[in-house]
Image (cartoon, rainbow, N blue to C red):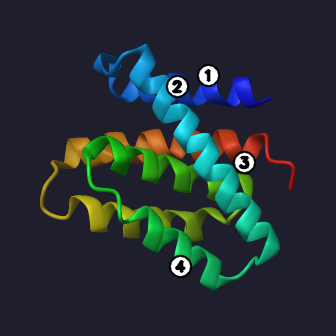
Amino acid sequence: MKEQYIKAIQSILLQHDAQAGDNTSLIAAEAILNNGFHWVREFSKQPNETTIVNMIHQLSQAATEQDKVVALMTLAFVLGTTKMPTDVATGLFDELLFRFFDNRSSDEELTALKAMVANLYQLAAEYSPF
């Protein structure tokens, strides 16, 4: 199952940035899955707002563009896997997007990022064990 997730995440990443290349997208997909599993376990132990706030805080520390994409995709994986309601998930995505890209990205770039995140959220929700 892990390999299938990695391939699916890698495919979504390459749709967003075809120039990233197979190796870069593979490394990013593995990081998304590993970080995602970590936060799913944390949320399973303590399914409360504090866990989500801690996750958002940690993910918002990403510095590079690639790290920011990994953070957004990690959030999508966690929220989809934990079956977070769509309206709540959308609010959390918007919060992280605002922290990362306030006044620095075009509407087209933000729309593309939101579409990528939505794809992973749906995939994770579909295959969620919860």
Q: Are marks 1 and 2 in contact (CB under 8 Å)?
A: yes
C-alpha gap between disc 4 and disc 2: 27 Å
Residue at image coords 53%, 79%: 53
Q: Position of residue 119 (x, y in %)?
A: 55, 39
Q: Residues within 10 Å of mark 1 (few under 14, many from 20)?
A: some
C-alpha gap between disc 3 and disc 4: 21 Å
Which residue is the site of mark 4? 53
- Circle 3: residue type: Ala
Q: Which mark is residue 7?
A: 1
Q: In the figure, is residue 77 to the left or right of 112?
A: right
Q: Which mark is residue 10?
A: 2
Which residue is the site of mark 3? 125
Q: In the figure, is residue 63 to the left or right of 21?
A: left
Q: Please report whichever mark, 1 or 4, sits nearer to the chain's N-terminal start.
A: 1
- Circle 2: residue type: Gln
Q: Please report whichever mark, 3 or 4, sits nearer to the chain's N-terminal start.
A: 4
Of tags 3 and 1, the one toward the viewer is 1
Q: Please report whichever mark, 2 or 3, sits nearer to the chain's N-terminal start.
A: 2
Q: In the figure, is residue 64 to the left or right of 125?
A: left
User: Is any part of residue 109 visible from this angle?
Assistant: yes
Q: In the figure, is residue 88 to the left or right of 129?
A: left
The secondary structure type at the circle numbered 2 is helix
Q: Quadrant of the C terminus?
A: bottom right
Q: How many marks?
A: 4
The secondary structure type at the circle numbered 3 is helix
Q: Quadrant of the N terminus?
A: top right
